[in-house]
Image (tube, helix red, strand yellow):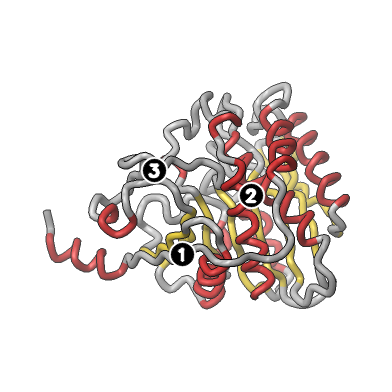
Amino acid sequence: MRLPLIIVCLGLLIAHSRPAAATAAASADSARLRRHLTYLVSTPQPRNHQYVAVLDSVAAYLGRQLSRSGGRVSEQPYQAGGQTYRNVIASFGPATGPRLIVGAHYDVCGEQPGADDNGSGVAALLELARLLGQQANLKQRIDLVAYTLEEPPYFRTRQMGSYVHAKSLHDEQAAVTGMVALEMLGYYDDRPGSQHYPFGPLRLLYGGRGNYVTAVRKLGGGRFARRFSRHYDHGAQLPVKRFIGPACLPGVDFSDHLNYWQFGYSALLLTDTAFYRNRNYHHATDSLEKLDLRRLALATDAVLAALLRM
């Protein structure tokens, strides 16, 4: 054991949490979240890269829901492995000006329903769209993006939907305020010892119960990520842990936000910590009945509250 390294890491990875606070007046609806999740986990085949027709049908569903919420909806098709895949984008607020991106991937890894990974993030995105559509006079342009091909074999490649989207912003020299990735937000476990970590001593800082959402940002990740994580914490009615650490620590870059880092945008991850808590991760047991939709709704409310405070 290299004690000096552990001391340095503990000095850098500082835990932040606070009591529950009031959120925005509009609230996420757990019944609507359930309806979206039921659709996502009930497709004829799993929504993975092998079933392009299924992914297309999911993209169409997402487009309809986003449009009904009042978003200006467009698709971003691109080629990967000889097939066409598509991101779905909905814009709220001003048509011009800097964009604040909130995204979630809708594909799954392999033959699994993917209720938490990442049905929960997509359901939250759709419910967030409904809530944003109720807000009058949004001063900030907010783009909600549903990505495809986040999962293997495309993870960490230029065929990830989030890479395609981030690169398109860079290529058109769009002004970007920052980006938030919604990645697995529906699984909670109040039992002692239910929460695990990539680095054992972190348990001393964050606790052993998997009952919180983590706002994850990297060291030097920029002003937006720092401000958003603080606003998310302050607006949440469930426990939040703010985590800052090196991008090389396993899990810190395990979602779509990593591609925005590549183009110099400030980005962060909101998550229930995935496989560090949910042992159904990437298994057929990642099913709807294991999710806590009440807390998923609270996690979604906190996103809205943070966006409105930005």
Q: Secondary structure at mark 3?
A: helix
| Quadrant of res 302 | bottom right
Badge 2 amino acid? Ala
Q: Position of residue 75 (x, y in %)?
A: 81, 50
Q: Quadrant of residue 265?
A: bottom right
Is the residue 46 above or below the residue 268 in the image? above
What is the crowding at mark 1: few (fewer than 14 residues within 10 Å), some, or many (at least 20)? few
* Disc 3 residue type (three-letter): Tyr
Label ID, residue 276: 3
Task: In this rendered view, identify the residue nearer to me: 107 or 122.
Answer: 122
* Residue at horizontal 73 percent and vertical 22 percent from the top: 44
Amino acid, disc 1? Pro
Asked if residue 159 can be seen in this view, the reply is no
Q: Determine which of the numbered discs, if any, sits on residue 19 in the image.
A: 1
As drawn, 198 above or below 10: above
Quarter holding the C terminus is bottom right
Separation (CA) of disc 3 from disc 2: 21 Å
Residue at the outermost top position: 44
**Secondary structure category for the residue under label 1:** loop
Nearest the eye: 307 or 188:
188
**Residue 215 in the image: x percent, y percent?**
49, 60
Closer to the camera: disc 3 or disc 2? 2
* Residue that label 2 marks: 297
Chain-order first, disc 2 or disc 1: 1
Q: Position of residue 274 (x, y in %)?
A: 46, 43
Name the spot of residue 12 as percent of width and height, x first. Answer: 30, 69
- Which mark, by number, is residue 89? none
